[in-house]
């Protein structure tokens, strides 16, 4: 019975591993750039080496157990060694210790070499992006020497394919950790301390990342997306993001804007080109150009937006957005306005 449940558990773990590997949006074993590829090589090297060691140890252990059994007796016989056998056993133990130490040193050397390689930037014109962790979302800023051209967005990072990207990290509250496994290793975001990490995406795609340091109640819902796209598409996106929000055209959206500017929304959010300029919550200037809301937790749909505005505490309890009371008509107008923020 115990054997059977063991097999069931092992099969379930194998299936979970296989499914996890297939889910390519967030995977350490599906690298999309040179840094993640180095880390993947290191992972497999350690995996195979430790697997071989485990198999050898289990084989030796099993042999020892069966050898010490005497047929017809329940208890194993005590082993009385001759001096020759004793010397041989000592040699085996010493050899095993030496081999173990050599293996550990090889792993150490390979790890240090990988760490140095993935930290090394070989360009002097990277795309530079500021990532600031908040409980529980990511503020993304593309700095520009011209302040009017600085772009601030949230949770979705667009990068050009084949160009090195430097991520400068900071935190507004507690320690978070920036981790996009398809592209690079983890980097902690520590309050009052800025660090930099760099990566390069070698193919197009949308890669999911995740906060990797426990940072409170909604740590598990602190995701982000990295959208790697061809350079011209990226430039087009940047040009669009630099623009201020277009004034709404239709009456419903116009009313939605009035509700936004006269209600609680304006206390926390920025919409460039309007009087909304608070930095407590995410910048909403181009909210409708993002594919998700609530830190890559929900698809950016009309229904999800409405649910989030009215009762975000039900979706992400403890987040800083309060519950809001709007009549059905006001909510529809508000969402219609938000949907114009392309
Ligand atoms: Cu932020 Cu965990």
Image: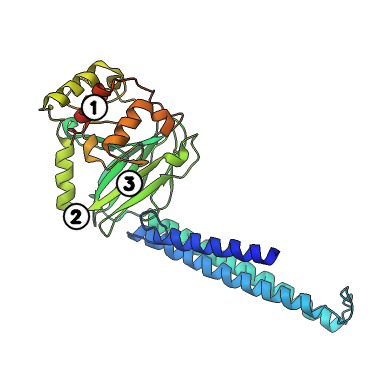
Q: Nearer the viewer, residue 265 or 215?
A: 265
Residue 135 appears in the rendering: no
Helix or strand or loop: what does disc 1 sit on? Answer: helix
Helix or strand or loop: what does disc 2 sit on? Answer: loop
Instruction: Verify CB contact (< 8 Å) between mark 2 and mark 3.
Output: no
Residue 133, how many percent across, how many down?
Answer: 39, 36
Distance from mark 1 CB to nearest ligand 1 atom below 8 Å = no
Question: Which label number is shown at residue 230?
Answer: 2
Name the residue tied to disc 3: 225
| Residue at 54% in and 61% down | 12
| Residue at 36% in and 60% down | 31
Name the residue tied to disc 1: 332
Say whether disc 1 or disc 2 marks the residue closer to the N-terminus.
2
Mark toward the viewer: 1 or 3: 1
Instruction: Verify CB contact (< 8 Å) between mark 1 and mark 3.
Output: no
Q: Residue furthest top?
A: 262
Mark toward the viewer: 2 or 3: 3
Please say which color scheme the image uses.
Answer: rainbow
Disc 2 crowd, CA 10 A, few/some/many (<14, 14-19, 20+): some
Q: Nearer the viewer, residue 296 or 156?
A: 296
Q: Is residue 84 above or below residue 145?
A: below
Q: Is residue 105 above or below residue 284?
A: below
Spatial distance from mark 1 to mark 3, Cα to Cα?
Answer: 28 Å
Residue 2, how many percent across, how many down?
Answer: 70, 63
Say whether disc 1 or disc 3 marks the residue closer to the N-terminus.
3
Q: Is residue 95 above or below residue 120?
A: below
């Amino acid at each position: 019975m115990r054997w059977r449940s063991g097999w069931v558990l092992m099969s379930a773990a194998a299936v979970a591993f296989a499914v996890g590997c297939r889910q390519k949006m967030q995977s350490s074993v599906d690298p999309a750039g040179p840094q993640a590829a180095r880390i993947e090589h290191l992972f497999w090297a350690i995996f195979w080496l430790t697997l071989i060691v485990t198999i050898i140890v289990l084989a030796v252990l099993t042999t020892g157990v069966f050898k010490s059994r005497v047929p017809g007796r329940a208890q194993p016989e005590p082993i009385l060694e001759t001096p020759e056998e004793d010397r041989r056993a000592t040699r085996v133990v010493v050899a095993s210790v030496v081999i173990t130490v050599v293996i550990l040193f090889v792993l150490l050397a390979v790890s240090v070499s990988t760490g140095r390689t993935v930290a090394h930037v070989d360009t002097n014109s990277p795309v530079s992006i500021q990532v600031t962790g908040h409980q529980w979302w990511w503020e993304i800023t593309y700095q520009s020497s011209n302040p009017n051209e600085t772009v601030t967005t949230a949770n979705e990072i667009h990068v050009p394919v084949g160009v090195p990207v430097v991520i400068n990290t900071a935190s507004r509250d507690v320690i978070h950790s920036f981790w996009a496994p398809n592209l690079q290793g983890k980097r902690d975001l520590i309050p009052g301390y800025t660090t930099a990490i760099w990566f390069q995406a070698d193919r197009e795609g949308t890669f999911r990342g995740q906060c990797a340091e426990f940072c409170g109640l909604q740590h598990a819902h602190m995701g982000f997306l990295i959208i790697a796209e061809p350079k011209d598409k990226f430039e087009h996106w940047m040009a669009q993001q630099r623009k201020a929000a277009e004034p709404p055209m239709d009456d419903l959206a116009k009313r939605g804007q009035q509700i936004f500017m006269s209600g609680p929304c304006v206390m926390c959010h920025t919409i460039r080109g309007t009087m909304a300029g608070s930095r407590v919550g995410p910048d909403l200037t181009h909210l409708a150009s993002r594919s998700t809301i609530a830190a890559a937790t929900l698809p950016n749909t009309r229904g999800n937006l409405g649910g989030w505005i009215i009762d975000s505490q039900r979706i992400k309890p403890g987040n800083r957005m309060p519950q809001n009371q709007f009549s059905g008509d006001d909510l529809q107008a508000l969402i219609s306005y938000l949907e114009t923020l392309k």
